[in-house]
Image (spheres, rainbow, N blue to C red):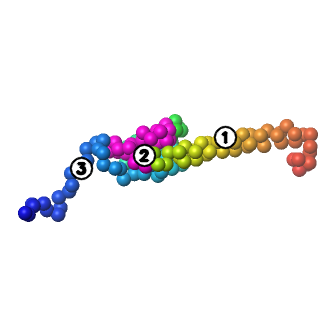
Amino acid sequence: MATNLSPQTAPPQAPFGSTAPPERSFIATWMFSWLLGFLGVDRFYLGKVGTGILKLLTFGGLGVWWLIDLILTLAGVQRDKEGRLLPDFEQHKMIAWIITAAGFGLAILTSALTQIFVYVPEQIGPMMPWWLGQ
């Protein structure tokens, strides 16, 4: 039995929201969203070029769009351009949440310490001239 399929025949495209596993990974999407989301890299990675360009031009919607996309990714509802969920979310969600929380906590701690070290010399400096090198 011979079939009339030529080697140039492309396989049929999966419809929007298909059940075929996506080529994108949760870990890569999460890292792009967290570290480069304000540039829209996560959107480009998922194949959403139009919204990626908008996100790039608005610097992640001045941070709001960046945060929303990060939350969507961490919640496991981020989809690729074909509407498929990222396949390895369940496997990596706990470590992604822990690292993200630690990163935000470290940023808050660093900001607080920076403010303390800016404020302390201004208040104590006049009492201790040697502090300011006078």
Residue identified by numbered label 2 = 43
In 3D space, how far apart are the residues under numbered discs 1 and 3 (Cα atoms)? Answer: 47 Å
Can residue 130 be found in the magenta stretch?
Answer: no
Q: Amino acid at mark 1?
A: Ile
Q: Does the magenta-highlighted stretch encompass residue 82?
A: yes
* Residue 124 lies in quadrant: top right
Task: Please state which of residues 69 and 59 is positioned toward the viewer in this rendering.
Answer: 69
Among numbered discs 1 and 3, the one appearing first in the sequence = 3
Location of mark 1 (residue): 108
Q: Measure the C-alpha gap from mark 2 to mark 3.
A: 22 Å
* Horizontal relation, residue 47 to residue 27: left or right: left
Q: Residue at x 73, y 43 (%)?
A: 114
Q: CA distance from mark 2 to mark 1?
A: 27 Å
Q: How many marks?
A: 3
- Percent coordinates x, y for residue 82 in the rendering: 32, 45
Instruction: Say above or below: 32 vs 5.
Output: above
Could you say which is closer to the camera, residue 82 or residue 65?
A: 82
Local secondary structure at mark 2 = helix
Q: Give, as a single range, the part of the protein colored magenta.
A: 68-88
Location of the N terminus (image quadrant): bottom left
Q: Is residue 68 above or below residue 23?
A: above
- Dot in front, 2 or 1: 1
Say which label, 2 or 3, has the lower sequence index: 3
Residue receiving disc 3: 13
